[in-house]
Image (cartoon, rainbow, N blue to C red):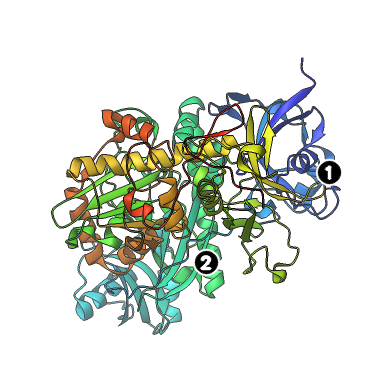
Amino acid sequence: MSDDALVIFTPSGKRGRVAKGTPVLTAARALGVDLDSVCGGRGICSKCQVAPGYGDFPKHGLHVGPEALSPVNAVEERYDRIRGLKPGRRLGCQARIEGDVVIDVPAESQVHRQVIRKSASERVMVMDPATRPLYVEVAEPDMHEPSGDFERLAAALEKSFGIKGLHADLAVLSGLQTTLRKGGWRVTAAVHEAGDGSAPRLVALYPGLREAPLYGLAIDLGSTTIAGHLVALDDGRVLASSGLMNPQIRFGEDLMSRVSYAMMNPGGAQEMTEAVRGAMAGLAAALAEEAGVDAAAVVEAVVVCNPVMHHLLLGLDPVELGQAPFALASGDALHLQAAEIGLAPLAPGARAYILPLIAGHVGADCAAVALSEAPETREDLSLIVDVGTNAEILLGNKTRVLACSSPTGPAFEGAQISSGQRAAPGAIERIEIDPVTKEPRFRIIGNDHWSDDPAFGTPTITGICGSGIIEAVAEMRIAGIMDPSGLIGSAEQVGTPRCVATGRTHEYVIHDASPDGPRVTVTQGDIRAIQLAKSALYAGARLLMDEMGVDQVDRVVLAGAFGAHISPKHAMVLGMIPDVALEAVTSAGNAAGTGARMALCARSARRAIEAQVKRIVKIETAIEPRFQEHFVAANAIPHATAAFAELAKVVTLPPVSFNAGGAPEGGGRRRRRG
């Protein structure tokens, strides 16, 4: 039996073998995992809480049994008894690794907490919310007129506002009599009218005249992050925006890993449902607290998400989405009680609306992007790419709109990258490489200065995030450090000692603070991960262009929180998107979140997207024979066959080619070391 064990930490993806009996905190520090600790490992501060995962992890080829960690010890029992540990949590300083294990580091246990860049973009909203406040005076009970308090409230609303057939959930009825008497029979009723022919519903009741607005919640439920915006329903103002990591990431970084987890672990789907509902409830409470708003005044929520997230949120089995023909349990828009999907902190009768799905792999988040960007209203041909773990792509104009999804994986977000991390203070997010000296300069999150500026100081540099790795790879191509095939040259070939041999390949060193600090590099494996991701993205876009019968588009829109931080030039150098004039590449910010807010603020927006989804033509990349052809050609940087003539107008890519013999080929000339 082996004396060591494999430990895999999520969401960082860092892994390694450690001696059995090693405390989780010690293993985390040895592998450079961001796990907090204040008390020096004495089990007092609880900053090092972790969540071990058990069961089958097909992506990692592991089965994790309950014996993978040491049993709960007296220190943990005491802490749980006095202060409480969340179910499934362990103290990293006390739990010892006894077998192969997957361990999730929750956001609150990370020293450098995630910066969720899904802030709400400014946009004037059309206001016609489904839930509105209605002030009424209700007849007091009368011995000679034995009707119930709810019936008299309903009668008052019908008389004053024409509200007919009012319904109320038990949660609302339970507090109704107290509120009526507290208000002296004068109350403000929050009434929800979906506009789909369903009965109006009493969502909440407030004593007296409520002068403050009602509030709604727009949630973009992504596979990696969950972003939320608290919105005033009187004028569409965004009062608070925040986000957190999707806790389901410990079950798998990509969607198919989570489907596999559900297939191979009885009760696995329910685990993931409970995890994401709990996270959404916490996010809702945090947003209300940030805005200084009573959560009971949040009367409605709109949620957008991809199909797998949709099914797991609703408690539906996602297994059919993992195999052809990728059948949805339901793709129509849904009107639900908010509490049914875990949003219990909201008003007792709060409602939730989920936008329609387009197809088995193209979800409500893509529908929200379509609502926000409205390509069907434009003459020019727009390619809209929502960049994420699963990229969703729209191509269209007034003639028609096409949609597809591409499995890009988590590399664009810093996962599966040797020095990668998600966006947090200390992460390299911008980089430039001098084409002559091959020396880099960079910027990190949390510091407005470039690294060669004296004002940069000596901050802690923790790794490189998604936008940084894209720029790094593109800059390496521009500087001749890497050839079109993605091969990194040697120090002799490139002319810089920053190209360091690692076995049969090389890596480029961006920053080296060893032995005490981090070493940030781009390895040959990192290049390959980026090539696979960008090839999938390009191939999906090219398939839609084939279907549309065009070789060029008029404009490219990069959507999503990550898309908002991608440099168009570097995206084009990589070949992530088809060739187009750089000025025609724009960012839409978090377009899915904007679409969710539009649907929250206006019933007309809901009707519009429900109709538009039925008109969008879905292209299934998994069964299209040309997808693989486009994918292979797109492996080259920027592309094996496409000319990228527009890119050539602004960027000259050196024609280098590195072979194993140590000399550049293909017309490349080695530059003198600077």
Amino acid type at circle 1 is Val
Residue 495 point in image, percent of width and height: 64, 44
Residue 316 point in image, percent of width and height: 38, 38
At 52% across and 66% down in the image, what residue appears? 287
Residue 537 point in image, percent of width and height: 38, 43
Q: Secondary structure at mark 2?
A: helix
Q: Residue furthest top?
A: 1
Quick check: marks 2 and 1 in contact, CB under 8 Å? no
Residue 461 in the figure: left or right of residue 115: right
Q: Quadrant of the N terminus?
A: top right
Task: Between label 2 and label 1, give the one nearer the viewer.
Answer: 2
At 80% across and 28% down in the image, what residue appears? 19
Tell me which label, 2 or 1, sits earlier in the chain.
1
At 67% across and 56% down in the image, what residue appears? 112
Residue 307 in the figure: left or right of residue 273: left
Query: Which is nearer the eye, 385 or 131?
Result: 385
Query: Which is nearer the eye, 594 or 558?
Result: 558
Residue under label 2, please give it.
Answer: 287
Q: Secondary structure at mark 1?
A: helix
Residue under label 1, please give it.
Answer: 75
Rendered view: 367 above or below 485: below
Amino acid type at circle 2 is Leu
Say few, some or many: other residues with alpha carbon within 10 Å of mark 2 (under 14 / 14 to 19 / 20 or more): many
Residue 458: name its quadrant: bottom right
Does residue 624 appear in this view? no
Residue 283 point in image, percent of width and height: 53, 59
Query: Which is nearer the eye, 171 or 67?
Result: 67
